[in-house]
Image: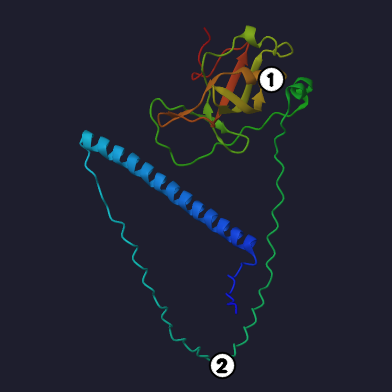
Amino acid sequence: MGVAFPSPAIDADPPVRTKRTKSRRQRLAGLLAALALEALVVLALLTLGSGRFAEMAKEGQPLKTFDLAAPSPEPVVEAVKTPETKKVETKAEPQPTVETAPAAPAPDVPSVQPPTPAPAQPSPLVQLSRDDLASADLRSLPSAPKPARTYGPAAPSSAADTPLASGTGPNGERLYAAAWQRGEPTEQEMRGYLQTAQPGWALIACRTVPDFKVDDCVALGESPGSQMARAVLAAAWQFRIRPPRVGGRYQVGEWVEIHYRYGTTRRNSWEKDRD
């Protein structure tokens, strides 16, 4: 009788085992390659570092080490809650009303009318221009009456003061005897004004102004029929008369009496003789 032996088990999937073996080998080879690469990098770093350290040792430069301390944590500050203040509502107290007394009525002030100014009195003197004087006929005018002598307190005077004349000005001004500044005008200088005049005398009053000149001249008298007053008034603008001297000082603006003679003998000692 025969003996039967069991047959060995046969793998049914041999290709699957082969694939697993290949994959394990590939992973092992990749791991070894990575380790070798890392070892090469470490070796290169060590080589470079050792060379730099050797150079520093040769140059005598000491190696310095330092520690990096971790930053200290910032303290946490807890916000302190302040107690809320309660708002206290204050009620405004009513102010007592004050009654003001009514203002007293203003007293009636009677209106005052301003005084009416008195009408200006016309001046008795008539101012004539040169043309009016040239065309006027003084022969028909009556002679001026002799002015009355005025009296008053005697003013202190010195030997150099100008003497007073006998008459007065057109408005009662004091008249001083005229004194020529550079001599009385000659007959040649007056010839243009004396063409129609006859020998005689003329008396005029003038107000002194700066630069030894006279202004506002008026006729006081003349010899009858001579027409001298008109000629002397026309020529008075070029007269040079010194202002009266009172108390040792010249008084510009005072009035002077000018007595001019033509073709007759002088009778006034205070007039300067002609050269």
Return the x and y of residue 217 as percentages of the image width and height. 64, 27
Q: Residue at x 38, y 26 (%)?
A: 159
Q: Pick the residue in front: 215 or 219.
A: 215
Give neighbour class at mark 1: few <14, some 14-19, many 20+ (Cα, 10 Å). many
Q: Is residue 184 above or below residue 100?
A: above
Q: Is residue 90 above or below residue 121?
A: below
- Mark linked to residue 270: none
Between discs 2 and 1, the one toward the N terminus: 2
Q: Where does label 1 land, which residue?
A: 234
Q: Under tag 2, what secondary structure?
A: loop
Q: Is residue 73 left or right of residue 115?
A: left
Q: Where does label 2 land, which residue?
A: 94
Q: Amino acid at mark 2?
A: Pro
Q: Is residue 68 left or right of residue 94?
A: left
Give neighbour class at mark 2: few <14, some 14-19, many 20+ (Cα, 10 Å). few
Q: Pick the residue in front: 266 or 229.
A: 229
Q: Is residue 23 left or right of residue 39?
A: right
Q: Quadrant of the N terminus?
A: bottom right
* The quarter of the displayed image where residue 156 is located: top left
